[in-house]
Amino acid sequence: MKQFDYLVLGSGIAGLTFALKVAPQGRVAIVTKKDRAESNTNYAQGGIASVTSQEDSFESHVRDTLAAGAGLCKEKVVRTIVEEGPACIAELIELGMKFSEREIPATPGALELDLGKEGGHSKRRILHAKDVTGREIERALLDAVSHQPNIEIFENHIAIDLITSQKLGYVGANRCLGAYVFDKKNNCVTTFSAPVTVLATGGCGKVYLYTTNPDIATGDGVAMAYRAGASIANMEFVQFHPTCLYHPNAKSFLISEAVRGEGGVLKTLNGQEFMDAVHPMKSLAPRDIVARAIDSEMKKSGADCVHLDITHKSAKFIIERFPNIYSTCLRYGIDITKEPIPVVPAAHYQCGGVVTNVDGATDIAGLFAVGEAACTGLHGANRLASNSLLEALVCAHRAAANIMASPPDKSELKIPLWQSGQATNADELVVVAHNWDEIRRLMWDYVGIVRTNKRLQRAQKRIANLQEEIHEYYWNFIVTADLLELRNIATVAELIVRCALVRPESRGLNYNLDFPNPNPEWAQRDSVVRRAP
Ligand code: FAD
Ligand code: SIN
């Protein structure tokens, strides 16, 4: 049994920011399932959206966020996050984050932040570190953490389940007491107890066959919170990024929206621009619209991909602004300064998640969720580009400040140690691998960019069958990381389908051919699901 004041699950921007803020007041455990930097954060390219220019305004950022969110954002939450962004970013810079700068045109020698542009933004407002913003954020935060004696990081530790008072049979309001955690290297389960547990476990792109997300993104936080009895909302709003590199050997490589922000144009394989007819913002329209247009173009023509062309910009500009995209594509034989980039949409971001307020509080005492794992109401039915790093940063600050100002119940309750199943099974690996593949493929085919109720119901039946099998495995055999993740992607798949079936309309990222229009009755309604008691 390990005891801490704060248990943080995840070491992306949300978990690390929270840990750094509370560390002066208590001992913090950061539990993370791979190496400390491995997270969605680490792969973020475009940057962080925030108002830092005289030509921009909070009002304009709020308006763009609400427009992308298609009527479902919580305006008060949007305002809070947008308005508190600049101060949190200033702190990040203070910690050592280096954003790209440019020379101020009228003042040679003087520098200002270089601001990028992305889909749905009416102004240049994206702070970035060339095209490797996330890598630089992780570097800066992990460096700061390494100087904090109160923080201990447990790498290659995967949280299995939350420990709650209700599950242990205690009477009274449900309280989170910590988590059971699988130590992958030593093959054992450790009990972590803490009065505050923070889910900063990120998203669930791996639920889909094609995704921009790294392997860690299996929706563990949402699945754990659901099993613990927390409310989960809006899981039907899975954001498909329009431009993932299409190449047989490339795994999940994103071509940043910033490429379109700098003039990149979407074209058919015949060189025809097709976004002009779809939206006034053309290739820079909000993501849901661009992803659907590409999907429809590919279905119409039977092509495997479309093209993103930035060859009209100078090679010098492209290589300086997008060094990572340029060199990665070149490794696959594509010189983006001379030829268009083959791209396809892929699952990218989970707009729904564990229901929280803007301070990260869930409906279970002592349990908080921050970052992509949480559903605060910022994104509504479709996230505006580069608003997720902003949300994670601001909400981690707010959660830490609020918890320190009014600490939760610290009275100790007895927690039993983990009871391990004894059986091992020789054919386990192949069954787990098969079920992983089946879920991801059926989610892609039946619960993708365009849905119908019939396909959703088919998916629901198949997921239920798979869950029965997984359940049996889980209770009879010794746990492994693959089995834990499989159980979680099955739960998240179930939640996405359930939320999609609850919503009788098309709105933002949820496009259902049986209900092709928005339904005004659902304009401000979240699709909330909870585990039956
Ligand atoms: P993550 O950064 O994903 O961190 C999750 C952490 O939890 C990881 O450390 C993981 O190992 C750990 N974890 C998960 N499950 C467990 C478990 N069971 N036990 C222990 N640890 C666990 N957003 C923007 O705003 N701007 C961008 O430019 C941008 N670009 C992106 C590019 C790519 C390729 C991708 C994939 C996403 C991008 N996003 C971008 C989205 C953004 O990166 C994420 O939403 C954000 O980084 C999420 O931060 P987080 O801290 O909530 O989660
Ligand atoms: C990108 O660089 O296109 C990703 C931005 C985001 O997901 O917000």
Image (cartoon, rainbow, N blue to C red):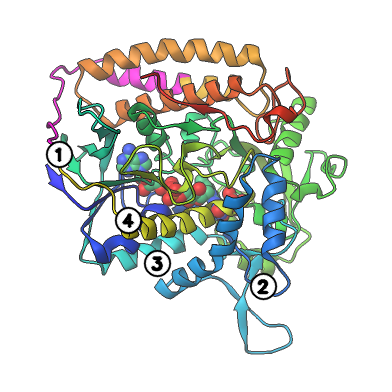
Viewer-nearest of labels 1 and 2?
A: 2
Mark 1 touching mark 4, by CB under 8 A? no
Q: Which mark is residue 186?
A: 1
Q: Residue at x 57, y 12 (%)?
A: 457
Point out residue 120 in the picture as x, y percentages from the top left corner: 72, 51
The disc, 1 or 2, on the residue closer to the chain's N-terminal end is: 2
Q: Which residue is mark 3?
A: 140
**Magenta span:** 413-438
Viewer-nearest of labels 2 and 3?
A: 2
Mark 1 touching mark 3, by CB under 8 A? no
Q: Residue at x 59, y 39 (%)?
A: 247
- Dot 4: element: loop
Viewer-nearest of labels 1 and 3?
A: 3
- Dot 2: element: loop
Q: Which residue is mark 4?
A: 406
Furthest residue toward front: 172
Q: Which residue is mark 2?
A: 53
Q: What amino acid does circle 1 point to? A: Asn
Dividing the picture into quarters, in which one does residue 411 lie?
top left
Q: Disc 1, ligand 1: is the CB inside 8 Å?
A: no
The disc, 4 or 3, on the residue closer to the chain's N-terminal end is: 3
Residue 14 appearing in the image: yes
